[in-house]
């Protein structure tokens, strides 16, 4: 397997624009996690899915953020409208089961909102 | 709520030295703990997953220990090499065990 695949690797957008980040988890993994990493706050969990169903979105900072997982092989994280404070690296990770198994991370999407 | 702390935040050592990275967690009702490595501009790579039933877990020059009663885990790196330079993060389960809380990491630099 190619691992967790995220796209794009880098995204620069203007404030107010919609941004969509994409993730393809490892085949056979039941859990998918979206994280955000910043220097100030470290690595924060935004939302996670189990078998394509959102389980916990308590980490989603605002209603401007939304995530979907239409099938087992694809998930999106959307920010609309984007703001400069959303600038961060966004990671997607998948696990075969929950946190009791090894987590595999994608390479991340570096988002810059100007 | 699980809180994870890592000390030191940064560490610089000469090549060949043995070193220990520390991780503390507040909720000891965990069944495992993971150590990750992150290279600049890259994602996280899982190094070791140590179960609560284990005291230690080893992979090559890496050895992780877990002491639930004291809320501590250590990552021991033997005979450090420049290629070990990276940020090391530990993560403990939280929220019923389905998600991870990460520490802020220790940035390691191994110098020639």
Image (spheres, rainbow, N blue to C red):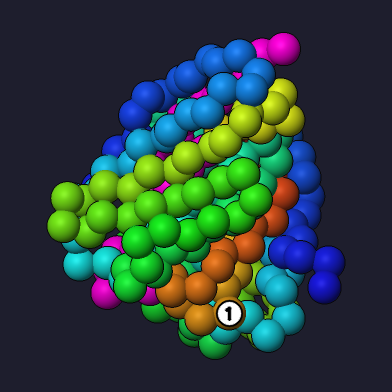
- Quadrant containing the N terminus of chain A in the rendered view: bottom right
Where residue B28 appears, as percent x and y from the top left, is 19, 60
Where residue A41 appears, as percent x and y from the top left, is 39, 35
Where residue A51 appears, as percent x and y from the top left, is 54, 87
* Main SS class of the magenta portion in the image: strand
Q: Quadrant of residue A28?
A: bottom right
Please tell me whether residue B95 is drawn above or below residue B77 in the rendered image.
below
Residue in the foreground of this view, choosing between A90 and B64:
B64
- Quadrant containing the C terminus of chain A in the rendered view: top right
Residue in the foreground of this view, choosing between B38 and A9:
B38
Say if the magenta span includes residue B93. Answer: yes
Determine the residue positioned at 69% across, 56% down: A106
- Determine which residue is flagged by label 1: A96
Say if the magenta span includes residue A109. Answer: no
Q: Quadrant of residue A88?
A: top right
Please state the chain letter of the residue tagged with numbered disc 1 in the rendered image.
A
Where residue A54 appears, as percent x and y from the top left, is 46, 78
Query: Quick one: which residue is furthest to the right in this view?
Result: A2
- Mark 1: which secondary structure? loop
Determine the residue positioned at 55% across, 67% down: A102
Please tell me whether residue B32 is drawn above or below residue A42 in the rendered image.
below
Please tell me whether residue A40 is drawn above or below residue B88 in the rendered image.
above
Residue in the foreground of this view, choosing between B63 and A30:
B63
Q: Is residue B3 visible?
A: yes
Determine the residue positioned at 41% across, 58% down: B56
Q: Is residue A85 visible?
A: no
Boundaries of the magenta span: B88-112
Q: Is residue B111 left or right of residue A56?
A: right
Determine the residue positioned at 26% across, 55% down: B67
């Amino acid at each position: 397997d190619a691992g967790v695949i995220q796209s794009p690797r880098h995204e620069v957008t203007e404030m107010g624009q919609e941004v969509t980040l994409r993730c393809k988890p490892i085949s056979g993994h039941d859990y998918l996690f979206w994280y955000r990493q910043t220097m100030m706050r470290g690595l924060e969990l935004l939302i996670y899915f189990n078998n394509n169903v959102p389980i916990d979105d308590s980490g989603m900072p605002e209603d401007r953020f939304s995530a979907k997982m239409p099938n087992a092989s694809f998930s999106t994280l959307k920010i609309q409208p984007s703001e400069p404070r959303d600038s961060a690296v966004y990671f997607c990770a998948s696990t075969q089961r929950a946190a009791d198994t090894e987590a595999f991370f994608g390479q991340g999407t570096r988002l810059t909102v100007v | 709520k699980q809180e994870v702390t890592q000390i030191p935040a940064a560490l610089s050592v000469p090549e060949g030295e043995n070193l220990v990275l520390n991780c503390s967690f507040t909720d000891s009702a965990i069944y495992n703990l993971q150590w990750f490595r992150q290279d600049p501009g890259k994602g996280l790579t899982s190094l070791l997953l140590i179960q609560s039933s284990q005291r230690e877990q080893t992979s090559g020059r890496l050895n992780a220990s877990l002491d639930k009663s004291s809320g501590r885990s250590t990552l021991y790196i033997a005979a450090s090499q420049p290629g070990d330079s990276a940020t090391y993060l530990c993560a403990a389960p939280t929220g019923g065990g389905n998600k991870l809380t990460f520490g802020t990491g220790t940035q390691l630099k191994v110098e020639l």
